[in-house]
Image: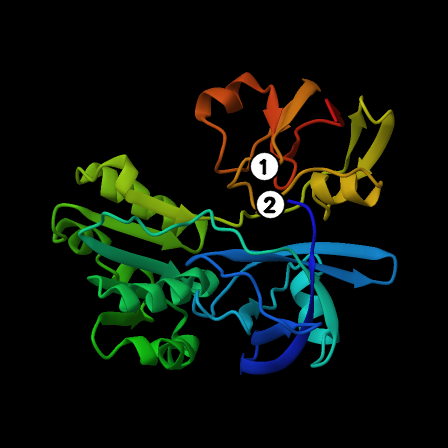
Amino acid sequence: MTGTIPVRVREITALAPTLKRFAFEPAHGGAFPTAPAGGHVMLTLRDGARVMKNAYSLVSPPGARGRYEIIVRKVAQSRGGSAFLHAHVAAGDVLEMAPPVSLFPLAATARKHVLIAGGIGITPMLSFLAELQARGARFELHHLSSPEEVPVFERLLAPYAVDADIRVHGGGRAAFDLAGLLSRQPLGSHVYTCGPHSLMDAVGTTALALGWPRGSVHKESFGAAAGGLPFKAVLTRSGMEVMVGENQTLLEAIEAAGVAARCLCRGGACGECVTRVEEGEVDHRDDFLSDAEKAAGALIMPCVSRARGPRLVLDL
């Protein structure tokens, strides 16, 4: 994706000690592009010479063109984006935002929509709820939360809970009857999940085991770009060697070196940044490549995946 929109921070609301909602407006007036339900935007954050790019789900209704909203959790293992937003961004600041895109659309022909979220994975579901209500669609939502944040998420979901089955579960995965929930859904239902990989994997595995068609199971993943051992990336077309730090993604290192690499979700889900590997072994951490493609080792998703050894040679 190319091009960004200058946006002004209109207001910031603290929802919990680690959760803040950021509202943006077009910095130069006018209206935003219409955002798809389940869409996300990418913010470019500048901290001196350091540039950070982070993708966030829009939680504002899809038709809200005068105001975009995101909810950001400050996490201890943040590589800078969420911590920077929480600590340094204030109302009135102007940031750079890529236009919204969606990798997580609602199925137009679904008889019923079953939404299952965990933690901050509720964010894409919030714009889903506004869209589903506007359509008059049949749906239910289950959100798995830590016990202390149950009231926070109940308040967020309260506007949608009048005519729908919306529940916040604070008892952990063990107390949530996933198989029972999926087994009682009518034929033609679609299930959507976002949250920790363990939850999304459980939803997909359970649904398929119960006979759900693969095409009726949808997930939104922004990846888990955990660190690892440092390594060297050799970029053959650019004629460069780039060192990738232990708490840095390969994509971040490439961008810091001044190489314009394609990206969209920055979480290993969309395939936009897929790059050919000429030499070296890959530690695959994405949700895009097939098992066969991962075994072949000829492709890598630089936004989340790393080298298993000291060196990777890339066609970049």
Q: Vertical placement of 260 versus 42: above or below? A: above
Which residue is rendered at x = 14% and y = 53% of the image? 185
Which residue is rendered at x = 52% and y = 24% of the image? 294
Residue lying at the far front of the rendered structure: 30
Which quadrant: the C terminus? top right
Q: Vertical placement of 15 versus 273: above or below? A: below
Tag 1 near tag 2, CB within 8 Å: yes
Label number found at residue 162 = none
Amino acid type assigned to the residue bearing label 1 in the image: Glu
Where residue 311 appears, as percent x and y from the top left, is 76, 25
Where residue 252 appears, as percent x and y from the top left, is 74, 45
Q: Secondary structure at mark 1?
A: loop
Q: Secondary structure at mark 2?
A: loop
Amino acid type assigned to the residue bearing label 2 in the image: Leu
Q: Give the alpha-carbon distance from disc 1 to disc 2, as whole Å.
A: 6 Å
Q: Would you say 117 lies left or right of 111 here?
A: right
Depth order, front residue of 36/156: 36
Q: Which residue is mark 1?
A: 272
First of labels 1, 2 by sequence position: 2
Q: Which residue is mark 2?
A: 264
Depth order, front residue of 291/93: 93
Which residue is rendered at x = 29% and y = 63% of the image? 132
Residue 28 visible somewhere in the drawing: yes
Where residue 171 appears, as percent x and y from the top left, is 31, 69
The coloring applied to the image is rainbow
